[in-house]
Amino acid sequence: MTTCCRQRCTTWILALVFFAELVLPIPGQAITIGEEEELSAEMLRIIFKKLPVVDDPYVTAYVNRVGKRILSVMPEQPFRYRFYVVNEDMYNAFATPAGHIFIYSGLLEAMDGEDELAGILGHEIAHVYCRHISQKIELAKKVGWAQLAGMAAGILLGAAGGSAAAASAMTLGSAATGATAQLAFSRENEMQADQLGLKFLTDAGYGTEGLLKVLKKIRSKQWFSKEQVPTYMMTHPAIEDRIAYVGSWIDDHRGQRPPMQKVNPAEFERILTRLMVEYNDVSSELGRLEQILQREPGNTLARYRYGLVLARSNRTTEAIVELKAVLARNAFNPYMLRDLGKVYFFGGQLDAALSALDSARSMIPEDPDTLFYMGRTQQELGRSAEAVALYTAVIQKTPDYRDAYYFLGQNLGQQGALADAHYYLGIYHLRARDFKTAATQFKQSLRTSDAPEKRERAERLLKQVEEEIKAEKKALEG
């Protein structure tokens, strides 16, 4: 996707979430929980079509663990929260109705630790907790959806550096003018989310300094032109006031907070490594890491990442040399050993791959990547039964590991187990949000299965994807 296309996609999403972030709640006036969930479902369909949401079992599981740790100390919530990462080099984060929270990879990669991630997630959780979106919908009764959309687009044009005339032309009418005036209360909204977010962080055992650090990083990102202002500052205004407030809150509460719970910094480093290596531009990442290693030749983490990016660039021999050098200093690091096994696999060195992966498995027996690539290796060696067992273990332990469904279905099809093969391929395409292909696969599973239990599970998922197809069609017609 080109930079221009990505900017247009981001503008669409900002228009969707704009009112969620910028309006003072109106006590006693809100849409129902059910209506909020329906609105959220519609927004998610657009978001997943417009934005490159990361589908990675490690990244999403980690961000969800941090979010759920915060949720664990809160009162019972009416929504089932979900946390996502968007693969965009931008400083941004936002929440939709009903607890769907998105953070951009650019902002995540700018962080130095889990406490900073927790700070941003705590703030977004607080927006959902306050039901800012559901409170805002009340304006639709006075203004109407078309004018609200025009207002959002107009304000976004102004925020993104568009002409004042173009922006103001989209906010005409006395009702729209009155509604726009309510946007002035957005500072109070942000302060409320920070106040509650800080409490949630403290109760969850996180250091509150993380939020202050990341807000200062976002502020430092702005340069000279309006086009270079971080997107987060467009949807989360008054950042100077927020920094001052958060700093004062931290000073006022020193010595009053419960002991912080320890976090494993290595886990945060692994997630950043995953994002940088798997999702960033290869040539840019190679250049950046080469510069770091020129300055710091003993930087083990940079060398490890460099080896992985070399592998992604199909420079397998060089990658193996780098990873072996790193492993010589970290002989008992199972994740580095696993990654060496993956590089051997993609380089066609199957026996070496199986040996490295088997050693890693002895230390991290439930790691999904280790199991998955052992399955891939066994499949390439012609050991289909062993591969099926490993893929099955992956999806049992990590149901969000999408590629395991594909290779499991492929192997089962080669063995002649067509009903199961089509079923798992259907799940693969369902998780890829390719609903039409998923429906085709589930129908094929039904045609080739006589087992009642298998038919029931395929029928249930077929109904789900057919509902999604109808909803997408309706959205397009609307």
Image: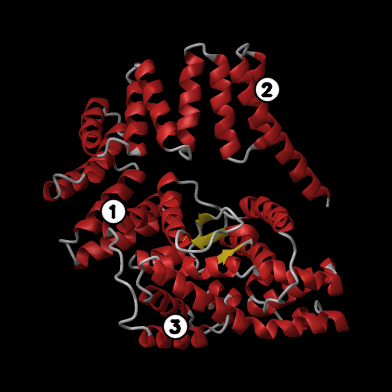
Q: Which mark is residue 246?
A: 3
Residue 318 visible at all: no
Q: What residue type is labelled 2?
A: Lys
SS at circle 3: helix
Specify which label sits upstream in the sequence, 1 or 3.
Answer: 3
Viewer-nearest of labels 2 and 3?
A: 3
Q: Which amino acid does label 1 sit on?
A: Arg
Viewer-nearest of labels 1 and 3?
A: 3
In the image, taking residue 392 as reference, residue 225 lies left or right, namely right
Q: For residue 225, which quarter of the picture? A: bottom right
The reply to whether discs 1 and 3 touch (Cβ–Cβ < 8 Å) is no
Label 2 crowd bin: few (<14), some (14–19), many (20+), radius 10 Å: some
Q: Name the residue under label 2.
A: 443
The reply to whether discs 2 and 3 touch (Cβ–Cβ < 8 Å) is no
> In the rendered view, how is the structure colored?
secondary structure
Q: For residue 286, which quarter of the picture? A: bottom left
Q: Which residue is drawn at 23% across and 55% down?
A: 303
SS at circle 2: helix
Q: Name the residue under label 1.
A: 305
Q: Which residue is drawn at 68% across and 80% down?
A: 158
Q: Which amino acid does label 3 sit on?
A: Val
In the image, taking residue 45 as reference, residue 265 lies left or right, namely left
